[in-house]
Amino acid sequence: MNTRLTRLLHIEHPIIMAPMFLVSNVNMAKAAAENGIACCIPALNYRNEQEFEHALVELNKMGKCYGINLIVNRSNIRLRKQLQLCVEYKVPFIITSLGKPEEVIRLCKPIGIKVFCDVSDMKYARKVAGYNPDGLIAVTNQAGGHLGSLSPGEFIPALVSLFPDLIIISAGGVGDHVGLMEKIHLGADGVSVGSIFIASVESPVSEEYKKACIQYGAKDIVCTTKLSGLPCTVINTPYVQKIGTRQNWFQSLINRNKRFKKWFKMLTYMRGMKVLRKAAFDATYQNVWCAGISIEHVHSIRPVKEIIKQLIA
């Protein structure tokens, strides 16, 4: 398919392999590029700037399109150095999440780095559009991880109508070719797809995590606020059922306190990411696995190449 997204990023298919915390890596990016799509990797997947820089060196050797995801709110204390490296290595594109992308756009666009911004509602979309990014990523209520509140049928046409000059990418709910075409017919220039790639051969997570994406389906995805304070989708394992998906009354009280909520949110986020990291790579009964409803389409562990065929066939 020939869309504004394929032309801008010089890719064959209008698909971005979504940035997945702990999951996305260089091997997945290489497999994506070799099969006509672009992969975006969270900068936070690397423990320090040395590891991140080494990954950028490897990614640039491909000579093909890839992206880096930057968290641009206060929780990311490493943002300035991460952005500096992205500028230095001239990454093809950046996806910003959870904050104000003004500085990223100001530094990157003049040197040819494309910038797409995650948006989860119309109010935030209007604000972000004012910074003149290359496009908006509509994080819908079908997204895995942090999700929005609007359905694709509501959100995508509204963004297309309001911002005709911006590339609109739909995030959430795509697991096969039918899902891809549904979003294109709504007016999207492309899609961001994540959860179905968790159970890929190239994915670095544990076999237990991958098998969970096969064993469970769309009906087993629940939303929790315990990981980051924001709604986040996880697989409803017995451990998740045991601990619940809502913050207790004391946590909710602190979260509303003007004096303490900033620090409490940061602490909640750090603890939540630690839980996810342990579950993703270690054998543990504390199985909190992040995924979206598109795992309904996951039936085996396959190479990235085969999963892409499922999307474009």
Image (cartoon, rainbow, N blue to C red):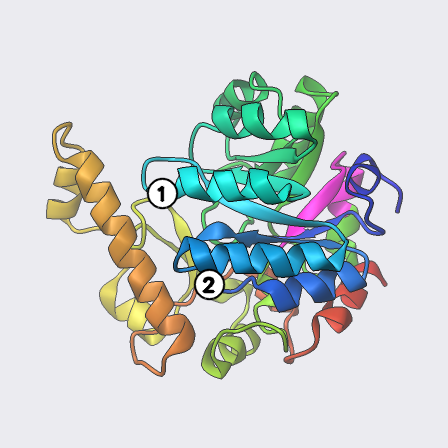
| Local secondary structure at mark 1 | loop
Query: What residue appears at the point 66 percent right and 37 percent down from the top-left corner?
Result: 153
**Magenta-colored stretch includes residue 186:** yes
Q: Position of residue 215 (x, y in %)?
A: 53, 78
Furthest residue toward right: 2
Q: Which residues are magenta?
A: 182-193
What quarter of the picture does the C terminus occupy?
bottom right
How crowded pointer 2 is (Cα within 10 Å; few <14, some 14-19, many 20+) is rated as many
Q: Position of residue 77 (x, y in %)?
A: 33, 42
Q: What label does residue 257 carry, if any?
A: none
At a point 66% along the width and 35% down the height, the residue shown is 113
Is residue 281 a member of the stretch shown in magenta? Answer: no
Q: Residue at x 66, y 33 (%)?
A: 156
Element marked by disc 2: loop
Q: Is residue 139 visible?
A: no
For residue 259, what is the image quadrant? Answer: top left
Q: Is residue 160 left or right of residue 119?
A: right
Q: How many other residues sit within 10 Å of disc 1, few (<14), some (14-19) or many (≥20)?
A: some
Give the amino acid type for the residue marked by disc 1 in the picture: Asn
Give the numbered dot on residue 22: 2
Q: Quadrant of residue 239?
A: bottom left
Q: Nearer the viewer, residue 110 or 181?
A: 110
Gap between marks 1 and 2 measured at Cα: 15 Å
Query: In front here: 133 or 55?
Result: 55
Vertical comparison of 274 with 15: above or below? below
Q: Which residue is mark 1?
A: 76
Q: x and y percent of residue 17 in the render?
A: 65, 55
Count of marks placed on residues? 2
What amino acid is found at the position of numbered circle 2 in the picture? Leu
